Amino acid sequence: MSDGLTWQLLRQRERPIRASFLELFFDLAFIFALTRLSQILLADLSGVEAFRTLLLFAAIWWVWFVTAWSADWFDPRAPLIVVLLLWVMFGDLLMAAAVPTAFTEHALLFAGAYVAIHLGRAALLIPALRGHPLQVRTARVAIWFAVSGVLWLVGAAVAPAREALWATALVLEYALARLGWPTPGLGRSSWPDLRVSGEHLSERYEQIFIIALGELILMSGVAYSQGGLDRDRTVAFVLAFLTAVALGRLYLVPAGARLGRAIDEAGPPGSKLALLAGYLHLIMIAGVLATSIAMELAIAEPRSHDPARLFVSAAGPVLFLVGRVLLTAVVHHRLPWPRLIGVPVLVAGGFASAGLPLLGASSVTVGLLALIIVADAFVDRHTRGAVELGTGG
């Protein structure tokens, strides 16, 4: 049975692994989810709604991440895996649809879809993997998702405890993944057990980040189209586009293109790096989402002086840059000084622009991002020149 499954269900590791059409099709649900999440904060920028949005986003990200990790092991052309990916995609769409009212009348739909995704994955894979070592790994994960599922469903039923129970469930799931899903009687998964293809997973990270940038451009375009196309809104739309370009450049250079190589060269411990990269992408994409919200607000009301809106305008790029600095640190084992210095500079710029309208604050942010990119390019060129000189190149 195991040998048959190796050919019928599992990917052949000796072949290059690229993202399949079905994986990219699955990502469409993530676009929908991001647009729903942004609508929550557009309607209410309070701290309570920000925390709730973070919880919902962390759950949606976890669905994407676990699915991307699973897809690394299985052949997406296998009928069972096709069914699995479509199952997860439909569940993700249900979660996204419930996002605006996930803490009111549709809590059970959101939580139920989330639990059904994870337990449904196990229900499909565990029987199919009979006799294969992956069956035990899948069982470990399923048991813990069943435990956390109780927290999700009880939270959906008990409104006063909803935030606390859902937050506890997410902390449990994220922590257990880092610990290898330790399960009484089944042990825990080692890093060799969790080994993934760095090329494939890094490609998936890049694709989902581009989708997040796409949501920024899409929603900015919608806000601009609906806002009247006047001079101030045109300037705000240009700033939104430049912000997306800046974030894309800061993401891709340099670690974005080298993450896969670092994962593969690390051998079995590369799984730990791949998991950590998943956590850091959560931070970066949260920053992009916050930036998208800020750009929509700047386009809709460019002359607004609302402190909460000004805060979001600075917080998004700062959050992204923090995640990006940490990604460079774990991939290259060094700190990118221009970006590291850029974090407090962006914070200071946010305070300095507190008296400006949203359009002015967005201009300051774009200008500071441009300066960080220029400084980053200068340091990188100087470093490469010193290396070439030292090697006689």
Image: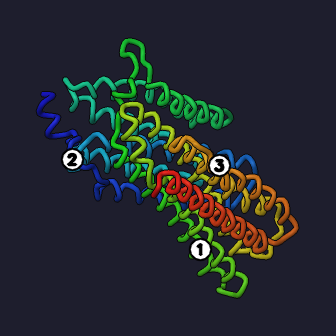
Q: Looking at the figure, which quarter contains the C terminus? A: bottom left
Report how many numbered discs are placed on residues in the image. Answer: 3
Q: Can you tell which quarter of the image residue 162 is in?
A: top right
Q: What's under tag 2, amino acid-wise?
A: Arg
Disc 1 is placed on an element classified as helix
Rounded to the nearest whole Å, what is the CA distance between mark 1 and mark 3?
21 Å
Question: Residue visible at 42% across and 18% down?
Answer: 183
Which numbered circle lies on residue 15?
2
Where is 320 relative to 179, above or below? Answer: below
Question: Residue visible at 27% across and 36% down?
Answer: 124
Give the mark nearer the N terminus: 1 vs 2: 2
Q: What's under tag 3, amino acid-wise?
A: Val
Instruction: Give the residue at mark 1.
Output: 241
Q: Nearer the viewer, residue 171 or 369?
A: 369
Q: Position of residue 51 (x, y in %)?
A: 68, 45
Q: Can you tell which quarter of the image residue 267 is in?
A: top left
Rounded to the nearest whole Å, what is the CA distance between mark 2 and mark 3?
35 Å
Q: Can you tell which quarter of the image residue 333 is in?
A: top right
Q: Residue furthest front?
A: 392
Q: What's under tag 1, amino acid-wise?
A: Phe
Around disc 2, counting alpha carbons within 10 Å, would you say few (fewer than 14), some (14 to 19), or many (20 or more)?
few
Disc 3 is placed on an element classified as helix
Q: Are marks 1 and 2 in contact (CB under 8 Å)?
A: no
Q: Is residue 105 in view from this perspective? A: no
Disc 2 is placed on an element classified as loop
Instruction: Give the residue at mark 3.
Output: 322
**Is residue 47 toward the left or the right of residue 35 in the image?**
right
Give the mark nearer the N terminus: 2 vs 3: 2
Q: Is residue 305 in view from this perspective? A: yes
